[in-house]
Amino acid sequence: MNPIFFGIIELIRGQLGDIPSLSNFDTNFILEKINEFESFLGTLSQDGPIASAHVILLAAGVVIFFGVAGEAFFKKTGIPDVAFLMVLGVIIGPIFGIIQPEAVIQIVPYFAALALIIIMFDGGLNLDLKHMVKTAHFAFTLAILGFVLSVAITTVAVHYLLDWSWLESILLGSIVGGSSSAIVFGLVRNIRISEETKNMLSFESALTDILSTIVAFILFGAILVGQFDLQVLQETLGRSVVVGLVLGFGVGIPWMYVSTKLSNAQHSYMLTLGILFLLFFLANSLGESGALTALVFGLMLGNKKHLARILKFKLPRIEVDDPT
């Protein structure tokens, strides 16, 4: 546990002891509770499965609370909620030491995968297909140019300033070269811009995330092998796009009908999440991009009325339950 945090607790303990009106039972009772809280925080900082469970629940609760509060503040002030979460992470981690990185590092990949699935699916749900088609060429151009330039600048800087190898420098460039859809999706909803611009920026950020993920994994494998093959990169990108589109459309089309049919069923949204997780698993099992699959699946469900007209099939009528 960070000594600064314990110092604050000791300061509170001393101040309580100096207050005359709390010199007897009240002071002892409060100091006893502070001791219990101090011991509890000490337990959280220890390694082990039980402590890790406490840490996970504490972190999840705090992040959710401040995430919602940050989003509300963002709507009022225009300051992104991501900044709140970053500051929060610094406070509960390095400053006060309430949560030790070593205690949660093993679960980070699982939470990262879950966040990627939900963010890409939610982004697809909120994309308007008509606006997206109009701005698709701009989004593709912006995504490719932005990604290539970011990777190139980062690669050259890291290679000459840090003396990394070219492959390692390109790997870092591909990791940081994309605009984060986690940030862009949240920002475009709360700023006053046209719907076409929102869709273009959202689609561009999704494309760069997919590019960044695929290229980074290919380069990581190339570093392990010791050589880079451009043909492998092209084949992998093409295969990832095909698999993502086939799975997303192949399951999304029938699920448009099923989800509409089950719209009044209890917990129907959980069934959709279950299908989403299965799709992500299938895509990754095939070695391809689960992120693209989640995006396409969300796009299908978010535009099912428009797609039903294009594909010329009828969605089932939603029956409204009689409240009486």
Image (cartoon, helix red, strand yellow):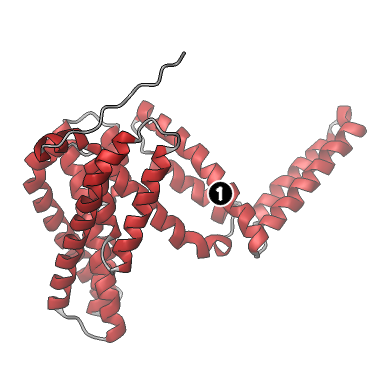
x and y percent of residue 252 in the render?
A: 24, 47
Q: Nearer the viewer, residue 21 or 283?
A: 283
- Give left or right: position of 31 versus 196: right
| Left or right of 230 in this view: 165 | right
Q: Disc 1 marks which residue? A: 59
Q: Quadrant of residue 15?
A: top right
Where is residue 59? Give x, y as percent: 56, 49
Q: Is residue 259 above or below residue 175?
A: above
Q: Residue furthest right?
A: 24
- Quarter location, residue 147: bottom left
Q: Nearer the viewer, residue 204 or 85?
A: 204
User: Does 319 sit above or below residue 306?
Assistant: above
- In the rendered image, residue 105, in percent from the top left (x then y), is placed at 51, 63
Mark 1 nearby-residue class (10 Å; few <14, some 14–19, many ≥20):
some
Which residue does the image show at 24% across and 66% down from the upper left?
214
Asked whether the viewer can see residue 124, the reply is no
Camera sees residue 259: yes
